[in-house]
């Protein structure tokens, strides 16, 4: 696995704010596609470990089990689908885009772009996705992980959040599961 973008803030051509992550995994595209579309695989690294997906344009997604979300269950809709290269869906006012590109028969470029509803959520969401992707990286490498909310992560969310804020990533949004302040 090679990290080509550990997490960066950007503004898309249409002006919407986003955070983006990119890796190259030493697996064929079909394996990486399974990691981002199969509920049993998402349970190992996605922030809401209980996911159902109607894998079709307009299909419903349901999410549950995130201890930091006040809502027990949230939903989204599939916005774009081009198996095994693209899955985009709405979730909590944001858009998540998983883009996969085969590099050869054995490796896949994986990009996660979180198009944000609000600019001030960038540091919060970047830190969250960073932790989730650490769990995904462990899964891809065949290392055991208890998921992004477990204490077995090599670095914690708060430390990553501070790093993103220090780097100038927009911040200020409430932190789920906290007293509503940002420290």
Image: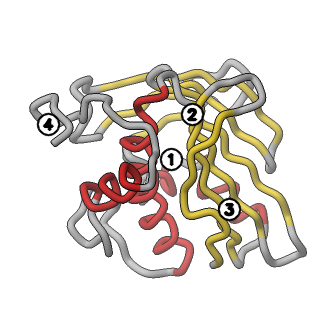
Q: Do callouts 3 and 1 mark residues in contact (Cβ within 8 Å)? A: no
Q: Do callouts 1 and 2 mark residues in contact (Cβ within 8 Å)? A: yes
Residue at x 49%, y 64% (from the top left corner): 136
Looking at the rendering, in which quadrant would you find the C terminus?
A: top left
Residue at x 30%, y 66% (from the top left corner): 146
Residue mark closest to the camera, 3 vs 1: 3
Q: Position of residue 127 (x, y in %)?
A: 39, 52
Q: Residue furthest left?
A: 179
Tell me the crowding category of disc 2: few under 14, some 14 to 19, or many 20 or more residues within 10 angstroms, Cα based. some
Residue mark closest to the camera, 4 vs 3: 4
* Tag of residue 39: 1
Residue mark closest to the camera, 2 vs 4: 4
Query: How far apart are labels 2 and 4 at the CA level?
Result: 29 Å
Q: Earlier in the sequence, mark 4 or mark 3?
A: 3
Residue pointed to by mark 3: 32
Residue 63 to residue 74: above or below: below
Q: Give SS at disc 3.
A: helix
Q: Give SS at disc 1.
A: helix
Residue 54 to residue 123: above or below: above
Along the line of sight, the residue nearer the viewer: 60 or 120: 120
Q: Earlier in the sequence, mark 2 or mark 4?
A: 2
Q: Position of residue 180 (x, y in %)?
A: 16, 28
Query: How far apart are labels 1 and 2 at the CA level?
Result: 7 Å
């Amino acid at each position: 696995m090679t990290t080509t973008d550990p997490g960066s803030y950007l503004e898309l051509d249409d002006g919407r704010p986003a955070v983006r992550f990119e890796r190259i995994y030493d697996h064929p595209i079909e394996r990486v596609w399974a990691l981002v579309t199969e509920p049993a695989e998402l349970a190992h690294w996605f922030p809401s470990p209980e996911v159902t997906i109607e894998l079709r344009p307009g299909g419903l997604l349901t999410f549950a089990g995130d201890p930091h979300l006040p809502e027990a269950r949230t939903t989204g809709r599939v916005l774009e689908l081009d198996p095994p290269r693209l899955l985009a869906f709405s979730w909590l006012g944001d858009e998540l885009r998983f883009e996969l590109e085969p590099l050869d028969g054995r490796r896949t470029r994986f990009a996660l772009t979180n198009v944000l509803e609000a600019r001030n959520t960038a540091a919060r969401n970047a830190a969250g996705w960073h932790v989730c992707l650490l769990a995904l990286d462990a899964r891809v490498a065949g290392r055991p992980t208890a998921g992004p909310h477990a204490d077995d992560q090599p670095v914690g969310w708060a430390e990553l959040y501070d790093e993103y804020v220090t780097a100038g990533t927009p911040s200020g949004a409430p932190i789920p599961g906290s007293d509503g302040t940002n420290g």
